[in-house]
Image: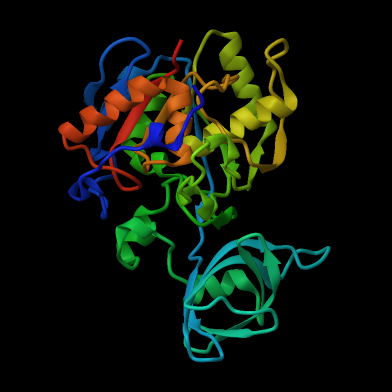
Amino acid sequence: MPLTLDDFDYQLPDELIARYPLAVRSASRLLYLPAHGQPKDQQFVDLPELLNSGDLVVFNDTKVMKARLFGQKASGGAVEVLVERILPDDATMSQKHTALCHVRASRSPKEGQTLSLADGNIHATVMGREDNLFLLAFDQPILPVLEHYGELPIPPYFERHADDNDETRYQTVFHDPAKLASVAAPTASLHFDDNVLAALKSKGINTAFVTLHVGAGTFAPVKTEDILRHKMHSEYAELPQATADLINQTKARGGQVIAVGTTVTRVLETAFQKTASFENPMLSAWSGDTDIFIYPSFRFGVIDKLITNFHLPKSTLLMLVSAFAGSEPIKQAYQHAIEQQYRFFSYGDAMLLEKMV
């Protein structure tokens, strides 16, 4: 039977959508789903007890840009711009003025039109289109503009504007300030605070970093009934050699690799496809764009456990976790989470999944 979109649908009561973060990052609940057996209700602070000394936890160190700008078209109509990817201008790549952007307006702007943004402090001209994105040329360097005038692009299902608290809480505690390029947070990492990180270290659990700059496509629902016809979005990813070495050493010692989030999963499994094989599983450094689409029947080459949040119905992320832990166990776990009133989505609770064997 081919997989259809309905296989990844579920009904979620609106009150279980977490629209604000908890007061303490690590105060979340953790639903532990072993490879065999029933889901177990835990607290996120229990995580170190569920892992072993010598295991390796891999994080995404990207930082979220204040990527959302508001303004108007020349006609006066309201417009909202979400900067998806800033493009290099020239060989020096020092001052970047052009970007691929999502543009929301009652009528799409045409090539050559100029948008007035941030109360007229910034102007951007439509240079063309690439698929569903607009190529905009800004009249000044983009990153300083976003830092000064932009709004943090919290998910649309929060149904609110970003506030001061989001500026801290919609970033991870370990983000790299130089890697300011995501339009969504790697949300599984939001549960980690200094106390949990210290507890991992004291148990002899190692940590490492990869980078994936999260695009808005992460929220895009799949619309094709046959999921294999879905066109996957592309995102920049990087596996440094130091992290590849740690993964290889961990595997050689019989330890497990734990991916924190679907973004880390996508980096590691892409790098495995590009630099390794099941016959020769030694990973090497890799960087580039990935549009890997992970759905049931996918064979994982790197990760043994996955820490992740609860995902939107009909999303590629729900397909990824179903591929990892099994479609039926995930369905049952989600039903259990709804019955036990777990908090869902970006500011919600977490899961610890073991790979289906």
Quarter of the image where one finds residue 83: bottom right
Q: Residue 268 at what x, y percent from top left?
A: 60, 30
114 sits left or right of 202 in the view: right
202 sits left or right of 243 in the view: left
Say if 253 sits above or below 311 in the image: above
Residue 196 is at least partly visible in this image: yes
Report the residue at 60% width, 35% height from top. 267
Q: Residue 344 at what x, y percent from top left?
A: 28, 42
Q: Residue furthest right?
A: 91
Task: State the count of labels.
Answer: 0
Q: Residue 265 at what x, y percent from top left?
A: 53, 31
Report the residue at 49% width, 16% height from top. 256
Q: Residue furthest left?
A: 340
Say if 330 sits above or below 223 in the image: above
User: Which of the pair 25/313 is nearer the observer?
Assistant: 313
User: Which of the pair 272/16 is nearer the observer?
Assistant: 16
| Colour treatment of the image | rainbow
Say if 351 sits above or below 223 in the image: above
Say if 265 sits above or below 253 in the image: below
Report the residue at 56% width, 57% height from top. 180
Q: Residue 125 at what x, y percent from top left?
A: 66, 81
Residue 96 is at least partly visible in this image: no
